[in-house]
Image (spheres, coloured by chain):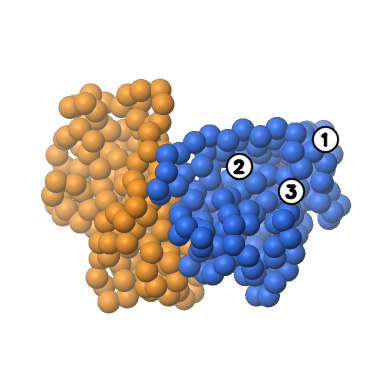
Amino acid sequence: MAGKLSLVTTTTVSSDTAQVILTGVDSTNVYMLVVQGMYMDGTNQDIRIRFTASGSAVTSSDYDYRHYTLYNDASSGGTIINNTGNIDLSQGLGTSMNNAFNMVAYLHNFNDSSQYSYIIYENIHRNTSQGRMGSFHGGGILQTTGANDGVQILNIGGANISSGVFSLYKIEE
Amino acid sequence: MSLKLISTTEVTQGNANKITINPVFSADYKVYCVQFQNTSADTQRENNSMDVRLVDSTGTEITANYDHRNLMFRGYTNAPFDLGGSNRDEIALIYHDKDDNHGNGNGTMWIYDPFGSNYTYHSFQETGSMAYPSSTKLGVHIRGGGVHKANTSITGISFTNRDSYDIETLTCRIYGLKQ
């Protein structure tokens, strides 16, 4: 990966916004998504991700995901969710940079219209209400064929994203 | 390209218990990729490991206010177990062993906004070879993350082997990620 990573697009959020959409996946390469310093305008709001097709989020209940949830003050556990409308990436999040969400994720097969699209993620975050560190490690699938060109990041409970830098990279061959 | 190599540290036949890389984090980047490989200690023991800590802008190694949690797949049982917890004196643990016993640690840390004066976060993965119990060799995989809970500007990182054993080998490359 070193030295062969190309920035496709980046979005910096500095005021409340309902969602972030990053597009630009246009090859069969693996892409890397990095989120840094994201927090919300309300406590206990999970951050979720969907994949986009032609720039619009795919909202059908065709997402499966599995991950381990790690907390500093509780036992770790596995989560398996099938046939849902998005991938839940976190516990309820925080509302300041000291309670922010950060993530590296890899996007596979997005531009292959004959295959499902896949994401592998590892994140680290902290919530405001409990001061609890969380780290989710896992992956998800959109089980419909068709090309996907990016991701949508949002909260489905009505909270806004107040801050964060969202970057999409292409891993060059 | 978006990843820029900032620092390379290579230790061979080392004779120090602690390796400190500082200064390396700055206002130039907010996301860093720390890749470590071929870590080993000069003395064999079960559960041999290195503490990873952060270094503040005065050059002082920080030994408090870390929360971290990792899943440790040690190969001794099928189920992973939880490593770390609250208010630790290290932000991560790298397991390895003596080089002559094929002990070896390799992995990647992503570190978020260390230089800013907010909490510093990281996610972590390691695969290596360690010993447990006694000198019985085992593969190990660890993954998780952590946070330094203080409004401190961080400029460096340190690796300290347990039991005052020397670090025999270590290669560490640190990259800045353009956002």
Question: Would you say residue B55 is visible in this rendering?
Answer: yes
Q: Secondary structure at mark 3?
A: strand
Check whether the beta carbons of the residues at disc 1 and disc 2 lie within 8 A of each other: no
N-term-proximal mark, 1 vs 3:
3
Q: Where residue A158 sits in the image (x, y, percent)?
A: 74, 60
User: Which residue corresponds to mark 2?
Assistant: A120
Q: Residue at x 60, y 42 (%)?
A: A120
Quadrant of the rendered structure where residue A167 is? bottom right
Quadrant for the N terminus of chain B, please.
Answer: bottom right
Q: Where residue B99 sits in the image (x, y, percent)?
A: 22, 37
User: Which residue corresponds to mark 1?
Assistant: A145
N-term-proximal mark, 2 vs 3:
3
The amino acid pointed to by label 2 is Ile
Q: Where residue B47 sits in the image (x, y, percent)?
A: 23, 36
Chain A's colour is blue
Chain B's colour is orange
In the image, are marks 1 and 3 on the same chain? yes
